[in-house]
Amino acid sequence: MTELLTIDDAEQLSVAEVQDLYRKHVNKSQVSLMTSFGFGRELVDHAEGPWIHTRDGRRILDFTGGVGVLNHGHNHPRILAARQRFQQQRRMEVHKTYFSPYLAALSHNLAAVFPGDLDMSFLPNSGAEAVEGAVKLAYKYHGGKRNTIMRSDISFHGKLLGSGSLTGSSQNHFTFPGIPGVVSFPYDDLAAVQAAVDATRDRRGKCDVYAILIEPFSASTMRWCSEEFLRGLRELCTREDIVLIFDEIYTGWGKTGTMFYFMRYPGLIPDVVTTSKSFGGGKSSISAYVARRPIFHKAYESFNDALLQSTSTTYYGFGEETATAIEAINVAVEEDFPARARDIERILGPGLARIAKEHPDAVAEVRGAGALWGVFLDAPRVLDLVTKLAPSGLAKDPQFGTKLVTCAVISALYRDHDIYTYYTLNGKNPLVVGPSLVTGTAEVEHFLDRLDQTLAQGLPRLVTRFVKEKVSSLW
């Protein structure tokens, strides 16, 4: 047997050794992809708040927000303390046949945060599991007598077989088997939803839709549903007894300026909400769906059905994860994360609008809310030549030019200014500006200044440099 590596061995690996092990045992193409941006060429020593510190002494401003995971920033002291306390006291981790005080308290806290009778929760590991659990709940609520589920055309709900089939992302270029009866509708189009529901009726006019799944704010496209659409959807689902599921996995816990995006509209209550990412405080792999009591009661509140709600996770009630999430919620409430997001928006919104105005040849649009914004870059005409020279698979991608431009800006921000950003693979591929909610005014202004400087170089120059660097790295 090959000699096993220890933790000490892992911490002594060089970046070249890490990349080599990735190529051998993880994914060779992943190494090539990540190093294209300038990332992956150094190793992280430690991280704190909005900052990443590499082994070679660089201090990187993290404006990815952990892709929704790090509302609390890196290694929030209260989150670390909660986990250390759990470990030091040698608390028991997991066993389904013991009741967990942590699970009980966390479920109480979720009910306290959410409005109305969103009182009942289930706590699996990932956002995709939460989505599948919510869909399973809706199907069971109808006793298997309805067979259609509806989702929007720009949705992103995960990459498992079930959640992946409910995802309308353009990155789904390979078809896997999935949940049957999935019907798509145009995002934020109430008339289209009504027409799609009507199309499922049988000869007696009975509706066949058991659930409608929607992201009130689409973090992968930077679009959001109007209040009219969301309230109309609520009325439609109530009228037709359809389970209404809001996916707030990314946008929860203050990110867009309210604790959850839908909560900006008083009295608007879905039947189920899914949450994950920052729910775990940046340390815990945990998610939840929270359901209205009548929906949950009809589906699972019987002796025979009590264990059917499981999404096949042995680690339901995982002790340290639930203890961490308890503290994460308390931090989000006590430090008023929604207000922090609004403070960031007051600087970020006008700042990005100014940059768009000053660089009309580079920025087509900016839009967002709270601490989650998209910068939509405009591919210049010079990219026509680059597109023609690209490999056939890439050249066929209608968004190739936009992706290339956005990658060039991301790379320049990282290499020249030590700022870490990313872009989404859905919609029009915006550069995402999504800082953690512990990011201060000075850091936001620093980012805006450096983005301005980067775009001032001109997109053709940035793209030329990026392509040259990529080509040279292949040789």
Image (cartoon, rainbow, N blue to C red):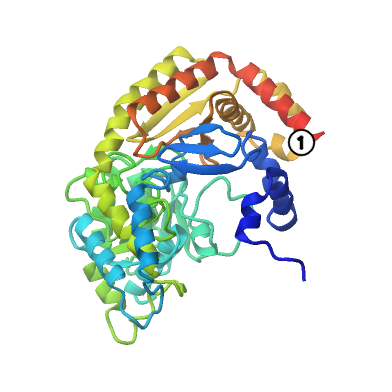
On the image, the x and y values in percent for residue 402 come to 59, 29
- Quadrant of the rendering where the C terminus is positioned: top right
For the residue carrying disc 1, how many other residues have a C-alpha within 10 Å: few (<14), some (14-19), or many (20+)? few
- Quadrant of the rendering where the N terminus is positioned: bottom right
Name the outermost residue toward the right.
475
The answer to which quarter of the image holds residue 298 is: bottom left
The residue lying at 72 percent from left, 27 percent from top is: 469
Left or right of 390: which side holds 88?
Answer: left
On the image, the x and y values in percent for residue 260 come to 29, 48
Left or right of 230: which side holds 212?
Answer: right
Asked if residue 235 is positioned above or below residue 386 in the image, the reply reads below
Left or right of 347: which side holds 266?
Answer: left
The residue lying at 39 percent from left, 52 percent from top is: 249
Front in this rendered view, residue 147 or 32 = 32
**Can residue 210 be seen from the camera position used here?**
no
Q: What residue type is labelled 1?
A: Pro
Asked if residue 92 is positioned above or below residue 379 in the image, the reply reads below
**Can residue 268 be seen from the camera position used here?**
yes
Front in this rendered view, residue 148 or 168 = 168
Q: Which residue was labeled with disc 1?
A: 391
The answer to which quarter of the image holds residue 123 is: bottom left
Name the outermost residue toward the bottom.
304
Count every numbered label the image shows and give the total: 1
The residue lying at 45 percent from left, 12 percent from top is: 358
Q: What element carries label 1?
A: loop
Asked if residue 279 is positioned above or below residue 468 in the image, the reply reads below
Left or right of 241: which side holds 431?
Answer: right
On the image, the x and y values in percent for residue 419 come to 51, 30
On the image, the x and y values in percent for residue 208 come to 37, 66
The residue lying at 47 percent from left, 47 percent from top is: 153
